[in-house]
Amino acid sequence: MHKLYNNVLDAIGNTPCVNVTFNDTHFYAKLEYLNPGGSIKDRSALYLIEHAEKNGLLKPGYTIIDASSGNHGIALAMIGAIKNYPVIITVSEKISKEKHDAIKAYGAQTIMCPATTFLEDELSYHSQAKKLHEQDPHSFMPNQYFNQVNAQGHYYSLGPELWKQSNGKITHLIAAAGTGGTISGAGKFLKEQNSEIQVIAVDAQNSYRSTNGNPQPYHVEGMGVDFVSPVLNHNVIDKFIAVNDDDAFAIMHLLSKQHGILAGPSSGAVAHAAHEFCKNHQPECMVAIFGDSGRAYLSKC
Ligand SMILES: Cc1ncc(COP(=O)(O)O)c(C=O)c1O
């Protein structure tokens, strides 16, 4: 039963976990697209902002500036609208029209940057956000790619929720890795409850990490470790599974047509990896994180 909330920020989290069965495999999908901003990023963005407020890094009148593949930007734009901060998001050309429009619908400004292969490239959306932030002393950059507080958001929000929701029965966590915040934060919390829990990160097959530093373009948004991420905690990750675009998109379509779950491409990648893992290992209770909704990509795929 939901209570009466003060605003949408109080309604972040407490998303449902539903059974997904494919032939002889089954896992639970945690539907993070049911967060108010439509993705898993509501959790980490809110934590990053409130942590900065508490620590005096973000003050009234400041502008929030960050780079985002879309969902972190949507979450920041939503939070900025409620807390009355102007928000500027640098995005890459890879972003879906729907996510780009959503950021602007919350009143935030976007800056389009080329889709560079390397995050350190001076034209990348991350470099351009950093430059803007350095030029404005009255700005705060959550810096989701390099700020460990990103993972703490999931440590305090998603991790405890998964533990409680499964009555402590969760045996496997599988989630997409972009910054690595989700898998590292929630994975750390779960391992502290039960060190036997297996934590599996899903990466893009063409990412910097999967290709040992020779990345190639790919289309799945949000997922893909494209740099040496300080947020990604290798100590809590037992296994990486790399998934290609075709496999991610194929199962994404099956999820909507056979299961009524209209999730996004990174959820398709997670579902593909979960299905392959379950075929060989039959985990007792695997929870797969579905990061966002397929509605954000309808014009793209
Ligand atoms: C849809 C979606 N799934 C997964 C991720 C990866 O999450 P993280 O950055 O916490 O690794 C993101 C990140 O933006 C995302 O947008």
Image: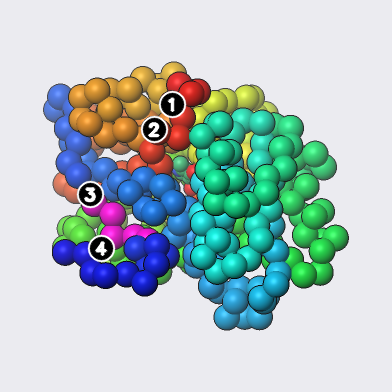
Q: Looking at the rendering, in which quadrant would you find the N terminus?
A: bottom left
Sooner in the amino-acid sequence: mark 1 or mark 3: 3
Question: From mark 4 to mark 3, how far is it between C-alphas?
Answer: 12 Å
Q: Which residues are magenta?
A: 12-17
Q: Which residue is mark 2?
A: 294
- Does residue 213 appear anywhere in the picture? no
Q: Which residue is mark 4?
A: 163
Question: From mark 1 to mark 3, how far is it between C-alphas?
Answer: 24 Å
Given residues 79 and 249, the one toward you in this image is 79
Q: Is residue 130 left or right of residue 201?
A: right
Residue 17's tag is: 3
Sooner in the amino-acid sequence: mark 2 or mark 3: 3
Above or below residue 200? Residue 168 is below
Tell me the element at label 1: loop
The quarter holding residue 200 reads: top left
**Which of the two discs, 1 and 3, sits closer to the camera?**
1
- Does residue 83 appear anywhere in the picture? yes
Q: Are marks 4 and 3 in contact (CB under 8 Å)?
A: no
